[in-house]
């Protein structure tokens, strides 16, 4: 689980650094997407309607550090996560690294220096 969390944090921080540096007009709102069918990332609490799980916690923490609020939405697939960010519908997308999808991700966003998460270099 630690490796997955590190990947989610790296994805979140990478995307936010790029968005914040660009002076994004949604600076007070962090829009995050996750794979709705993957309860390891996040899931909607049926009693409260709140999105919970590691992905939701990461999105909220990134938003808190940016003095913004988080809006977290589930989408159908990893491709939909990537598309939501590419199309400007989300600021960050939460998905595990997959070499087959890597070509679809804008590598220019990786301008931020690497950092350690849970003892792992991200």
Image: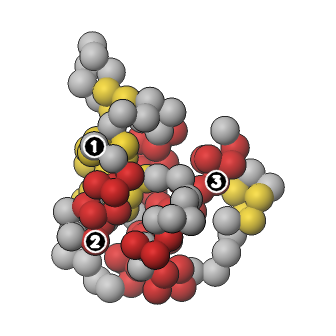
Do callouts 2 and 1 mark residues in contact (Cβ within 8 Å)? no
Q: Residue 104, position in %: x, y?
A: 40, 72
- Is 122 drawn above or below residue 8 in the view shown? below
Read off the residue under disc 1.
76
Coordinates of residue 47 in the picture (x, y in percent):
27, 13
From the viewer's side, name the closer residue of 17 and 28.
17
- Most foreground residue, 71 or 84: 84
Q: Residue 86: which disc?
A: 2
Q: Earlier in the sequence, mark 3 or mark 2?
A: 3
| Mark 3 closeness class: few <14, some 14–19, many ≥20 residues within 10 Å | many
Give left or right: position of 13 versus 119: left
Coordinates of residue 86 in the picture (x, y in percent): 28, 71
Instruction: Name the residue rendered at 59%, 56% in the picture.
Output: 7
Q: Secondary structure at mark 2?
A: helix
Q: Whole-percent x and y of residue 100?
A: 51, 65
Residue 117 visible? The answer is yes
Answer with left or right where residue 117 lies relative to residue 18: right
Q: Is residue 118 above or below residue 83?
A: above
Q: Report helix, strand or loop for mark 3.
A: helix
Quadrant of the rendering where the N terminus is positioned:
top right
Asked whether 68 or 36 is in front, the reply is 36
**Can you see residue 17?**
no
Q: Is residue 101 left or right of residue 46?
A: right
Query: On the image, numbered disc 3 is attached to which residue?
Result: 6
Q: Residue at x 44, y 30 (%)?
A: 39
Q: Which mark's residue is nearer the viewer, 1 or 3?
A: 1
Q: Residue at x 36, y 33 (%)?
A: 37
Label 3 – label 2 distance at C-alpha? 22 Å
Q: CA distance from mark 1 to mark 3?
A: 22 Å
Q: Mark 2 or mark 1: which comes first in sequence?
A: 1
């Amino acid at each position: 689980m630690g490796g997955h969390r590190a990947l989610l944090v790296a994805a979140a921080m990478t995307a936010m650094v790029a968005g914040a540096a660009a002076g994004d007009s949604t600076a007070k709102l962090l829009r995050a997407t996750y794979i709705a069918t993957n309860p390891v990332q996040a899931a909607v609490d049926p009693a409260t309607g709140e999105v919970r799980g590691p992905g939701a916690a990461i999105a909220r923490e990134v938003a808190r550090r940016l003095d913004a609020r988080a809006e977290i939405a589930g989408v159908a697939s990893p491709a939909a996560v990537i598309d939501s960010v590419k199309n400007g519908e989300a600021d960050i997308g939460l998905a595990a690294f997959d070499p087959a999808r890597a070509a679809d991700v804008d590598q220019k966003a990786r301008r931020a220096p690497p950092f350690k998460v849970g003892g792992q270099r991200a």
